Image (cartoon, rainbow, N blue to C red):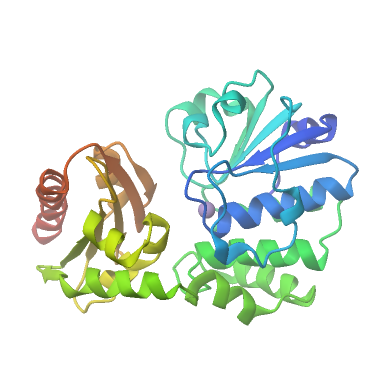
């Protein structure tokens, strides 16, 4: 996995850089941005890690938090990590519209704009996480993998491999994990904050969601409605990983979780157990993701969104039967 020369040249030529990722950042986004930020800082650059809507509290244990700040004027270079579309980046409007070059480092299979911007994009669908690409980027930039950078990269790798359980876990990934452990990473701290820890309110929300789960013909689904968020004093951020509880149900081929925090806005997460490509389903509704984990958003009521999406999933499941 070798970063293209033009990507390295662009990073070396710039001084002030803003690093960002997609909205609702998870471990790969936050870990990749902080790791690259720390490495660029060690090279004498001035990196800004920008998550306009904030970083989930669970990642506050990660080093490099001091780099999370907004540049007062447009930077020389913008780096999008784990996302390839400017509109999906968690930037304030004025930075989204900045005229500086936008660099893309992402492991999601390309869609639309990424191909157009391909000169400035490094897309590596073989990578288990963007963090894996960032590791090679840092090495190629001749920066040291410090224990701090290793902690951020391990969080990134852990997040996208389900802490080394998903099928993207391969010998190469485990070798990289071993290298990071050799730098002093504590695997339990990373797994606890990255995957296990949740707030009491979030557990209360989970219990409401689970109390109404439906499971039939390989499809398991449930939803959270505005009342749930209101009663438990939670936000959509507290539903992280909820969909995995649905995927855990015996016989599930596709799991779907609907969340309606307020108004006519529904967020939908899909998980598959290996047979159905849920990214293809999510794309039909304007979303995207990986074959086994995807998502989309709809400007509809929960009542209207649920049957629309479930019938698309049932169709895909029917297709399996006929094969
Ligand atoms: Mn990722």
Place residue 256 in its image quadrant.
Answer: bottom left
Classify 166 as above or below 293: below
In front here: 182 or 33? 33
Coordinates of residue 127 in the picture (x, y in percent):
57, 54
Whether residue 73 appears in this view of the structure is yes
Coordinates of residue 223 in the picture (x, y in percent):
21, 60
Classify 104 as above or below 146: above
Q: Residue furthest bottom?
A: 188
Place residue 157 in its image quadrant.
Answer: bottom right
The C terminus sits in image quarter: bottom left
Which residue occupies 52% across, 41% down?
A: 83
Coordinates of residue 240 in the picture (x, y in percent):
40, 63
Which residue occupies 51% across, 62% down?
A: 160
In front here: 97 or 172? 97
Which residue occupies 37% across, 61% down?
A: 234
Coordinates of residue 130 in the picture (x, y in percent):
59, 52
Q: Is residue 19 left or right of residue 164?
A: right
Q: Is residue 176 left or right of residue 217?
A: right
Whether residue 141 appears in this view of the structure is no
Q: Is residue 284 left or right of residue 310?
A: right
Q: Is residue 67 left or right of residue 306?
A: right
How many numbered dots are placed on residues in this image? 0
Q: Residue furthest top?
A: 99
In front here: 15 or 260? 260
Place residue 270 in its image quadrant.
Answer: bottom left
Which residue occupies 30% across, 60% down?
A: 229
């Amino acid at each position: 996995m070798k970063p293209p020369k033009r990507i390295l040249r662009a990073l070396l030529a710039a001084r002030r850089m803003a690093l960002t990722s997609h909205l609702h950042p998870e471990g790969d986004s936050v870990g990749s941005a902080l790791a690259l930020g720390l490495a660029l800082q060690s090279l004498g650059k001035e990196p800004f890690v920008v998550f306009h809507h904030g970083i989930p509290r669970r990642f506050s244990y990660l080093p490099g938090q001091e780099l999370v700040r907004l540049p007062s004027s447009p930077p020389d270079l913008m780096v999008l990590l784990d996302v390839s579309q400017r509109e999906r980046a968690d930037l304030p409007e004025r930075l989204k519209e900045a005229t500086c070059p936008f660099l893309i480092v992402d492991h999601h299979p390309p869609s639309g704009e990424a191909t157009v911007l391909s000169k400035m994009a490094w897309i590596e669908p073989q990578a288990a996480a963007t963090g894996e690409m960032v590791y090679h980027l840092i090495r190629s930039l001749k920066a040291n993998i410090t224990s701090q950078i290793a902690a951020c990269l391990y969080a990134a790798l852990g997040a996208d491999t389900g802490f080394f359980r998903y099928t993207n876990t391969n010998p190469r990934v485990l070798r990289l994990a071993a290298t990071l452990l050799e730098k002093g990473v504590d695997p339990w701290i990373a797994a606890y904050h990255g995957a296990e820890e949740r707030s009491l309110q979030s557990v209360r929300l989970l219990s409401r969601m689970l109390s109404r789960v439906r499971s039939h013909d390989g499809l398991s689904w449930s939803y959270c409605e505005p009342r749930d968020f209101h009663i438990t004093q939670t936000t959509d951020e507290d539903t992280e990983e909820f969909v995995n509880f649905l995927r855990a149900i015996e016989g599930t081929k596709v799991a779907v979780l609907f969340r309606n925090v307020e108004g006519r806005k529904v967020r939908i997460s899909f998980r598959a157990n290996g047979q159905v490509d849920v990214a293809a389903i999510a794309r039909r509704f304007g979303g995207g993701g990986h074959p086994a984990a995807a998502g989309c958003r709809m400007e509809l009521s929960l009542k209207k969104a649920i049957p629309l999406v479930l019938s698309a999933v049932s169709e895909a499941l029917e297709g399996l039967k006929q094969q």
